[in-house]
Image: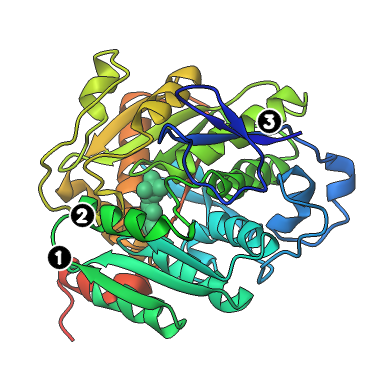
Amino acid sequence: MASFICRDTGDSYPLTEIRWQSDSKGLLDITSQLLFDPERVRALSPDLWRYRSSFPLDNKSIPVSFGEGMTPLKSVSIGGKDVLMKLDFLFPSGSYKDRGASVMITQAKALGVKRVVQDSSGNAGCAVAMYCALAGIECEIFVPADTSPSKLVQIAAYGAKLTLVPGSREDTAAAAMKAAAQTFYASHVWNPFFFQGTKTFAYEVCEQMGWKAPDSVVLPAGNGTLVLGVYIGFQELKSAGIISHVPKIIAIQAANCAPLYAPFHNGKSDFSAVKGSPTYAEGIAIAFPQRGTQMMEYIRATGGTILRVEENEIQQSLTDMCKKGYFIEPTSAAVVAGVEQYIRDHAQAGEKIVSVFTGHGLKSAQKIGKLLHIDT
Ligand SMILES: *Cc1c(COP(=O)(O)O)cnc(C)c1O
């Protein structure tokens, strides 16, 4: 049976507990094994809940779902090569964070939770607030006082209570963790149910490729909710004998805030917070990712690497993608810039590469307007 397991001590706890860290304050993972049959999945609803038997949820739990997922996998020419892009900016709240939030809030609902707290600098807050609205769960989101206004509007519009915290992103997390002592902490960083949702990215990609894995997957790396979930998903498919190998994970950080880049390339497994300067890629501007060591472990296990992209590369990729009809967030453009760099400096000829458009441009239209010098 699946359970929570502490990454530090190996202690385990039942999944029915309302818990987001171990008794020794360590990070939790969920032990689980893949339990879906590709043959039977074919006939199920065309959304991420078709894989529900692989989620460690009680059979009686009712999905908190809009029918999200199974986003198109579309070939896009990037850096002179055809890359298969997952169009995850098409999720109901406007970012792939819905994958994790749908599964995590389903678990909260099944446990009878009436109120959750969460902290986010944007899209994770939007996703959690949206699923809480659907589930009828009260929700409080802690955000840094300088979060972009349209994301604040979106969170509040869903009916969530917004609490602005002055200071750094870490101050916001501390405030939320304090509030979480008495309630369900719907954290996309601490709560491992979130990765049980983001793992569906790997399932969908493989199913859309005829149950084959690509050679490499290029993903953003802020807190690593995709990096971690995607690794778990591919690993499960491999253990079940459905695919033959786990693709290389190529993780992209903004050069202005890249805490894992140097430690990774120096063969280290620990790292420290970076000072960081502002970046257009606000969604991956995480100075100290809690699960950074775990991310580096997983990336190494796949034979992948970490790349960093400069601000001018992000701007150029954003321009290029918008001109092709993909109105994406600047953070998503950082991933595209990473794809270009990977193709230019690392990829083999004929390599099958998958990547992702993570967030919708309407979330930061004003910022994009400035970046592209659009006068309105
Ligand atoms: C959250 C987010 C990311 C990065 O995800 P991490 O989990 O922090 O690695 C990238 N793009 C967008 C649009 C996001 O919302």
Q: How far apart are marks 1 and 3 (CA)?
A: 41 Å
Q: Which residue position holds label 1?
A: 166
Give the residue displayed 71% in from the left and 44% down from the top: 56
How many residues crowd around disc 2 within 10 Å: few (fewer than 14), some, or many (20 or more)? some
Q: How crowded is mark 1: few (under 14 residues within 10 Å), some or many (20 or more)?
A: few
Residue with the mark numbered 3: 236
Q: Answer above or below: position of 93 versus 55.
A: below
Q: Name the residue under label 2.
A: 171
Residue 240 lies, in percent from the top left, at 77, 26
Relative side of 44 to 13, left or right:
right
CB-based contact (under 8 Å), mark 1 and mark 2: yes
> For the view shown, which residue lies furthest in the top direction?
267
Camera-nearest residue between 362 and 114? 114
Q: Are marks 1 and 3 in contact (CB under 8 Å)?
A: no
**Distance Cα–Cα, label 1 vs label 2:** 8 Å
Q: Which amino acid does label 3 sit on?
A: Glu
Residue 260 visible in the current orientation:
yes
Q: Is mark 2 on a helix, strand or loop?
A: helix
Disc 2 marks which amino acid?
Asp
Q: Does the residue labelled 1 lie within 8 Å of ligand 1?
A: no
Instruction: Please state which of residues 372 and 238 is positioned toward the viewer in this rendering.
Output: 238
